[in-house]
Amino acid sequence: MKKDLKKILALTLVFALAGSVFAKTRKIHVAHTITNVPYDFLDEKGKADGFEIAVLRAVDELLPQYQFVFHGVSDEELLIGTESGKYQLGSKGAWYTEERAKKFIIPSQPLAASVIGIAFRAENKDQITDLESFARYSGKLIPISPQSAQFSVIQDYNEKHQDNQIKLVPSDVFDIADSYLWVLEGRYDAYFVLKLSFEKNVLNEKGPYHQFADKLAYVPYKGIPTWPLFNKKETQLAADYDKAVQTLQENGTISELSQKYFGEDVFTFVSK
């Protein structure tokens, strides 16, 4: 009888401890964009996928006190919902801006990176090998919207290269549809564009500008870190995220995931 009582008490203690552990697990609602391949998107089965999603899932595995739940939403819903607290964090391949830093917690550790560089006429390959040589060649860059994060990247370059400037002309539209054609026509000599966008639109056989693949060339400039956006109240969550990402960097998980989704380790471009 005493043995049975001890077993019952032991089982009760086990279930009580298990219940307390589960009770402390907090659901974290993660908003993400649905067409931002390969960062954040929905696969053919409607499941969240992408490099940033994969990293966040790996973060979740290292943090037993949380359970990440992913929600595919529009860009606008992500920003509004994360700021209001409907979602605890948002993932959209976001670059750092002062405006975002005022509205959200931007952690110490980036989530991914966007490799950006210049597309130019292939006939100029000998003269243009990087951003500095492009500035010496002419510096005539397709206009960029001041609201675009790319604008600040060129501003930063010009501040560091006072004697070798790029002509930074503000555009009144965010995206100029004929940018590649303007370069080919000679109206401008380069287009500051994401490496992934160049690969998708020019190098890919199904790309709308693939017919010009032999007439256009590309050189990367640097990798721009992208960040998860945390609700302003989520200071502990952001701190826990930072520790987890540091572990994933050290054990090689992030590098492996980058190779899987990008075909290269995009973080090797960040320090350039």
Image: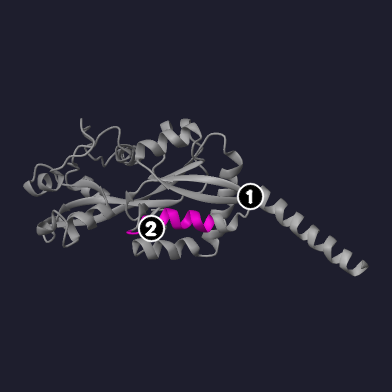
Which stretch did the figure color magenta?
A: 44-59
Q: Are marks 2 and 1 in contact (CB under 8 Å)?
A: no
Residue with the mark numbered 2:
266
Determine the CA span between mark 2 and mark 1: 33 Å
Q: Nearer the viewer, residue 34 or 241?
A: 34
Magenta stretch holds residue 48: yes
Would you place residue 263 above or below residue 98 in this image? below
Three-letter amino acid code at the position of disc 2: Val
Q: Which mark is residue 50?
A: none
Q: Position of residue 191 (x, y in %)?
A: 20, 46
Mark yes or no: residue 177 visible.
yes
Q: Is residue 212 left or right of residue 224?
A: left
Badge 1, how many Cα within 10 Å: few under 14, some, many 20+? few
Three-letter amino acid code at disc 1?
A: Thr
Location of the N terminus by quadrant is bottom right
The kind of secondary structure element at disc 2 is helix
Front residue of this view, candidates 5 and 116:
5
Taking the spot 11% from the left edge, 61% from the top edge, the residue there is 214
Q: Is residue 79 left or right of residue 241?
A: left
Residue 130 drawn at (x, y percent):
26, 53
Q: Which residue is denoted by mark 1 in the rendering? A: 25
- The residue at the point 36 percent across, 55 percent down is 46
Residue furthest right as drawn: 2
Near mark 2 (Cα within 10 A), the count class, few <14, some 14-19 or many ≥20, is many
Q: Is residue 153 above or below residue 198?
A: above
**Quadrant in the picture for residue 15:** bottom right
Whether residue 232 is in magenta: the answer is: no
> In the rendered view, would you say 146 is above or below 120?
above
